[in-house]
Image (cartoon, rainbow, N blue to C red):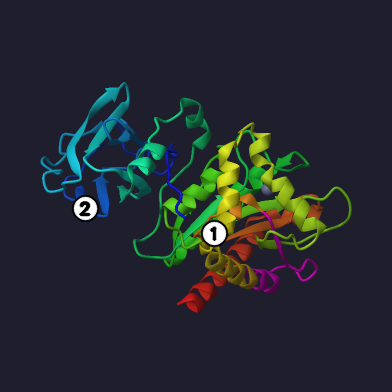
Amino acid sequence: MRIYISVFWLLLSFTTVQAQTGPARVLPGETALSSNGYSVTLVLALSRAVPYRVFTLDNPRRLVLDFSDIDFTFMPSGMADNVVQVSDLRFGYFKPEQSRLILDLSEPFTIETAVFDDHLLTVTLARASNAEFSQQANPPIDGLLARNQTAAIIQGDAGLPLVVLDAGHGGIDPGAIRNEVAEKKVTLLFALQLRDALLETRRFRVLMTREDDSYLELPERIRLARASQADIFISLHANTVEQGVARGTTVYSLSDEASNDEAANRAEFENRSDIVAGAVLLGQEDEIANILIDMAQRETNAASVGFADILGATLRYALDDNAPSRRMAAGFRVLRAVDTPSVLVELGFMSNTTDLANLMSQSWRHEANLAIIAALDEWLILAE
Ligand SMILES: [Zn+2]
């Protein structure tokens, strides 16, 4: 089963790209349109990454890319001449601070992936039936735009394994709160430090689902992992309990049956994220539930469980003996990507003063980062 990605709206965090001002320029050398009959690939090279969205429209069939301001001066001409599936390629100013690029499609093709990797936006279209095309073709819904803000730039050298780091919660969904510290801050702090540590090794590429205090729906986090064809998706959270003295990290993999009541409660809390934020899921929930049945998930699940086991062990070895890392399984919605191995890590208990101090400590986070990197190295070697 294949899920088509109908709309991406990727508002990029400008912290890494703010140095340059004015419209991003098209770089003609790396910009290309190609087809092998079954797929069409558009590569658009820009002088820097910019916010964008991509969607398809019917009657007539076309692919639309919206960007913030783009300077098309050096856009190569005649790009569609040798691609029979694209009858025309048009571009230009659309409305203030928004540019648009349109591919007129002579045959039905749907969006398979759209990824901004550094300065290269690659959109891949897959051959589809008329019905499939019509089903995907939809103008973006304005109400959705603000919710799907994310920093979707892949960092690191091409060809390296891609790790998607998902800082749990964000924006109007704070997650758990203890001593005026919100889980969304703890997870982002950890994710940003882990990103830097991963990039420093020069053995990984990294994509963050968010790099700031923005809110993302759970399905959007999954979509990012799939669209980027990530090797592994790591969702980061921090635990809380009302009573007791629970401590330590917990590594979760997806399972229809929770390990125990604690794991079930945890999944229920984390799955509530979209309800907290007022996002109504409607059909999405069914779609995701159906994916669970799909055969393709078995292989992905085995890979997820393999990584979760290794990660549980490396964290147990690296961190405090008094708070051994635990390994559990439960039905977390954010782990239900059909073809991306995924784990969820509860980094510690915010309800415990020692754990909370650890979470806020750069040196503790560094130790945990090293354990995660060791787990990734080991898992990738075993997967070869
Ligand atoms: Zn959480």
Say few, some or many: other residues with alpha carbon within 10 Å of mark 2 (under 14 / 14 to 19 / 20 or more).
some
Q: Residue at x 53, y 40 (%)?
A: 212
Tag shown at residue 230: none
Q: Dot 1 lies on which element?
A: loop
**Neighbourhood count class around disc 1 (C-alpha, 10 Å): few under 14, some 14–19, many 20 upward:** few
Disc nearer the start of the sequence (1/2): 2
The image quadrant of residue 171 is top right
Answer with the quarter of the image where residue 202 lies: bottom left
Residue in front for this viewpoint, 110 or 157: 110
For the point 67% across and 38% down, the residue is 174
Kindly identify the amino acid type of the residue bearing the numbered disc 2. Ser
Of all residues shown, which one is farthest toward the top?
Answer: 96
Q: Position of residue 352 (x, y in %)?
A: 81, 53
Q: Which mark is residue 35?
A: 2
Q: Is residue 174 left or right of residue 355?
A: left
Q: Are marks 1 and 2 in contact (CB under 8 Å)?
A: no
Magenta segment includes 315: yes
Q: Is residue 346 left or right of residue 146?
A: right
User: Distance of mark 1 from mark 2, alpha carbons?
Assistant: 29 Å
Q: Is residue 140 magenta?
A: no
Q: Nearer the viewer, residue 281 or 61?
A: 61
Residue at 59%, 47% in the rendered image: 188
Quadrant for the C terminus in the image:
bottom left
**Label annotation for residue 294:** 1
Amino acid under disc 1: Asp
What span is in magenta? 311-331
Residue 94 relative to residue 291: left or right: left
- Give the residue at x 31% y 35%: 64
Badge nearest the viewer, 1 or 2: 1
Q: Is mark 2 within 8 Å of ligand 1?
A: no
- Residue 355, horizontal then vertical, whole percent: 76, 56
Q: Position of residue 338 (x, y in %)?
A: 52, 57
